[in-house]
């Protein structure tokens, strides 16, 4: 991470911490504001696949931990960032998965958390859309650059009409945000 930061002096800051810890989202937003004076976007790209187990074999506490990481921490980040995103007209990008809409044996917790995340961003769009906060969703197991470049461009250039939708990184609506290869 330090190497990445060194490659972009004055443009990258690093916050190390557990995304589920209550203080981490506010720490990240505060660092962004103190370093860059504004917040133009929030990319929620953290998560866990665990527990990978059939429902009969997984514990409720393991599912709870997945929801803490994949859903409740996102709520904390959104709440910490919203005031600044309202000011800047910034966007929230939430990385989802096809597992939110397709069932896979052993991936129940993961799929359920991603479905909840999809609903969460749709709700935020309804509540905040008129205030200029746009929401996009993305999913897939790809080279990081593929969805990463689309996510970055959406955070800076995304249109309001894309807000609150579940879109794959290569959806026709996102062609202009994709690398031309």
Image (tube, grey):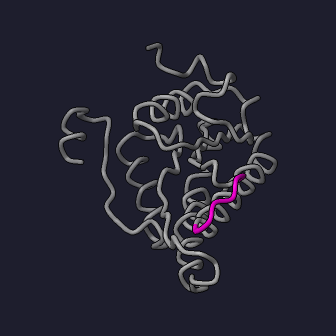
Percent position (x, y) of residue 125? 75, 46
Left or right: 122 as drawn, with respect to 78: right
Percent position (x, y) of residue 52? 51, 70
From the image, give the main secondary structure of the stretch colored magenta.
Answer: loop
In the image, residue 66 sits, relative to residue 132, either above or below, namely below
Percent position (x, y) of residue 126? 81, 47
Q: Which residue is depicted at the point 52% across and 21% down?
A: 178
* Total tally of numbered discs in the picture: 0
Which one is nearer the viewer's eye here, 160 or 164? Answer: 164
Q: Which residue is depicted at the point 49% across and 34% down?
A: 147
In the image, residue 9 sits, relative to residue 65, either above or below, namely above
Residue 131 falls in image quadrant: top right
Query: The C terminus appears in which quarter of the rendering?
Result: top left
In the image, residue 23 sits, relative to residue 175, either above or below, namely below
Q: Which residues are magenta?
A: 101-106
Residue 163 falls in image quadrant: top right
Q: Is-magenta flag for residue 64?
A: no
Left or right: 134 as drawn, with respect to 157: right
Which one is nearer the viewer's eye here, 83 or 171? Answer: 171
Residue 35 falls in image quadrant: top left
Q: Which residue is depicted at the point 33% across and 57% down?
A: 15
Q: Is-magenta flag for residue 102?
A: yes
Which one is nearer the viewer's eye here, 37 or 9? Answer: 9
Q: Which residue is depicted at the point 56% across and 85% down?
A: 61
Percent position (x, y) of residue 152? 48, 32
Left or right: 33 as drawn, with respect to 60: left
């Amino acid at each position: 991470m330090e190497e990445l930061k060194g490659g972009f002096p004055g443009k990258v800051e690093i916050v190390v911490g557990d995304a589920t810890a209550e203080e981490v989202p506010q720490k990240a937003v505060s660092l962004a504001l103190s370093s860059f004076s504004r917040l133009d976007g929030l990319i929620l790209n953290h998560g866990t696949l665990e527990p990978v187990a059939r429902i009969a074999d997984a514990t409720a506490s393991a599912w709870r931990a997945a929801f803490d990481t994949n859903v409740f921490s996102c709520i904390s980040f959104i709440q910490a960032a919203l005031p600044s995103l309202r000011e800047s007209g910034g966007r929230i990008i939430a990385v989802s998965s096809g597992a939110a809409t397709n069932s896979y044996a052993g991936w129940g917790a993961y799929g359920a958390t991603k479905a909840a995340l999809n609903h969460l961003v749709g709700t935020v769009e309804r509540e905040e859309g008129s205030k200029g906060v746009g929401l996009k969703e993305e999913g897939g197991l790809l080279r990081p650059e593929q969805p990463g470049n689309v996510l970055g461009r959406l955070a800076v250039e995304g249109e309001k009409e894309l807000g609150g939708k579940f879109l794959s990184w290569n959806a026709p609506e996102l062609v202009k945000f994709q690398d031309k290869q």
